[in-house]
Amino acid sequence: MAESDERATVRPVTLARLVETAHICSAEPRSTVDIEERLDVTHRRARETLLEALRIDLIDEDTAPEEAEYETTHVGEEFLSAVRSEDWPTVSDVLAARSPHYGAFLDVLDDVAPAALNAVLSELEVAEKHTPRSYNQTSVEVVGDWAERLGTIQRNAFTGSYYPIERDEVPANFPYALLAVYDDLEETAGVSLRQRYLSIPELRETFCERHRCRRDAFDRALRRLAGQNVGQLELSGAPMDTGAKDAKLGIKEMELGGDEGLVSTTQSTEQVMAGVEQFGKQYYYLAVHDRNLSYDSTEDTSEP
């Protein structure tokens, strides 16, 4: 275990590899060679993954055999149980309690969000200066990737800012909150370039960052609001007189049931730029024709 404690920074290990390593070691003790073969990685990558899993206490090392073997711990079994149940908040809680780097990242983000990567890094360096841990850009990206895939945080796909998810639904004053974001984005185009239609992907990313809510909650609320205010709000396809910025970052997700393992991961900018779907049609732009909007969050006029 001493070797796993020597490194001050978090190792560049993906969440999927941590899950698969704990999964592989849960049936019976496994050697490093076993891990190499099952993960289909080099010896160095396998060793790196094992050491980080040891640090987080997902596995334990038995050095008695001629070749060291690794077995999933009680913590690792709790971690796997949450993964199999797709209980991502519990998976995140286990990591926050056991991975000092991940826990520190979430604590700092709570204080400074929304924040760019460099701002998070600077705050981590200050907060952790009296610990044996250190951080760099890769460190933030690694633990940020874990948190994003678990739905604990989101990252603005256009600006790269990190922020924690604090609500599963939009605020009760959604129409007013949406109009405030709409006005702010419209202003950025300049007075002479005020746009009648604004990009739904940009509205979504800005709104979710400002109110720290999930993207799917925004989509549900926008469909509902548009359905309750026909003629006042217009969802549109792709008007020729406006162009949306391309997303710099993709949405990162993890789900159960990979073809070759316990989980599979995705990262796609297509999800960011997808707009919203209603009644079988895809809409990418929003226009506000009348600001006197009504909104009933209990009436579901949207599609499931």
Image (cartoon, rainbow, N blue to C red):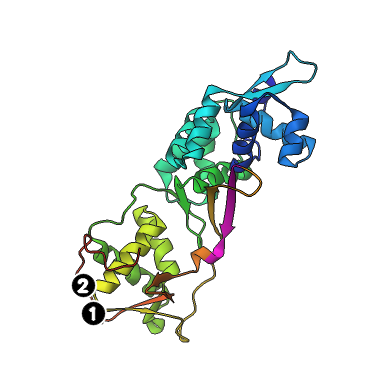
- In the image, taking residue 172 as reference, residue 139 lies left or right, namely right
What is the quadrant of residue 19 in the picture? top right
Q: Quadrant of the C terminus?
A: bottom left
Q: Are marks 2 and 1 in contact (CB under 8 Å)?
A: yes
User: Relative to residue 129, is residue 156 depicted above or below?
Assistant: below
Where residue 98 sits: x, y (%)? Answer: 52, 28
* Residue with the mark numbered 1: 290
Q: Residue furthest bottom?
A: 240
Residue 227 shows up from this direction = yes
* Main secondary structure type of the part rendered in magenta: strand
Q: Residue furthest top?
A: 64
The amino acid marked with disc number 1 is: Asp
User: Relative to residue 169, is residue 121 depicted above or below?
Assistant: above
User: How many numbered marks appear?
Assistant: 2
**Residue drawn at 60 percent across, 48 percent down:** 258
What is the quadrant of residue 8 in the picture? top right
| Magenta range | 262-270
Specify the label residue 128 is tagged with. none
**Residue drawn at 21 percent across, 66 percent down:** 295
**Residue drawn at 25 percent across, 66 percent down:** 175
* Residue with the mark numbered 2: 293
Where residue 248 sits: x, y (%)? Answer: 56, 63
Depth check, front residue: 137 or 233: 233
What is the quadrant of residue 143 in the picture? top right
SS state under label 2: loop
Badge 1: residue crowd in 10 Å (few <14, some 14–19, many ≥20): few
